[in-house]
Amino acid sequence: MSLTIKVEHQSSSVIFSFAGKINNPEETTDILNTLDKELESKNKSFLYDVSKLEYITSSGLNFFIRSLTRIRNVGGEIILCGVQGNVEKLLKISKLNEIFTLSPSVSDALTKIQAV
């Protein structure tokens, strides 16, 4: 299964829903361009629903780090939602689970982000 992304706006947050696999950097170029456009529109609250993301390589980790950097550079926040399986293992191994805010679900993340 290749990577598919759905972008939606809900409760002043931008939700990126990922499904499939991130195997190489080229797969994330369009997503980063979309993120840049959302940041230019002054959006600062981002949720990455990775519950249907089956697999990532170091390219996927790099994408998450680049996203985090871009969002935090404008004073925004990002929450990774539904982290499990291979994605969870790589985040723990790389210690990125200590840098990112994690949430079990999008609805829980929306509650967290609205409380800030």
Image (cartoon, helix red, strand yellow):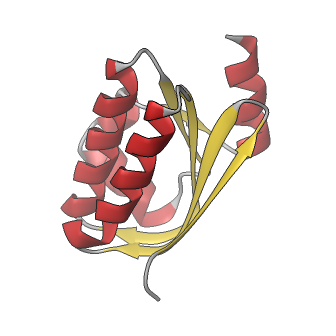
Up/down of 3 relative to 31, above or below: below
Please count the marks in the image: 0
Q: Is residue 73 above or below residue 71?
A: above
Judge from the rendering whether residue 38 lies leftward or rightward of residue 7; answer left or right.
Answer: left
The residue depicted at 56 percent of the width and 29 percent of the height is 43
Q: Position of residue 79 (x, y in %)?
A: 54, 35
Query: Which picture quadrant has residue 98?
Result: top left
Q: Is residue 103 left or right of residue 74?
A: right
Front in this rendered view, residue 77 or 85: 77
Residue at 67% across, 10% down? 116
Give residue 32's position: percent from left, percent from top: 35, 52
Q: x%, y% of residue 68? A: 35, 34
Residue at 34%, 46% (x, y): give it. 64
Between 28 and 40, the one lying in front of the other is: 40
Q: How far across and down, in percent of the image, does residue 51 sit?
A: 60, 60
Q: Nearer the viewer, residue 102 or 47?
A: 47
Q: Residue furthest bottom?
A: 1
Residue for point 75% across, 19% down: 114
Q: Is residue 100 above or below residue 7?
A: above
In the rendered image of this protein, does residue 89 appear above or below residue 80? below
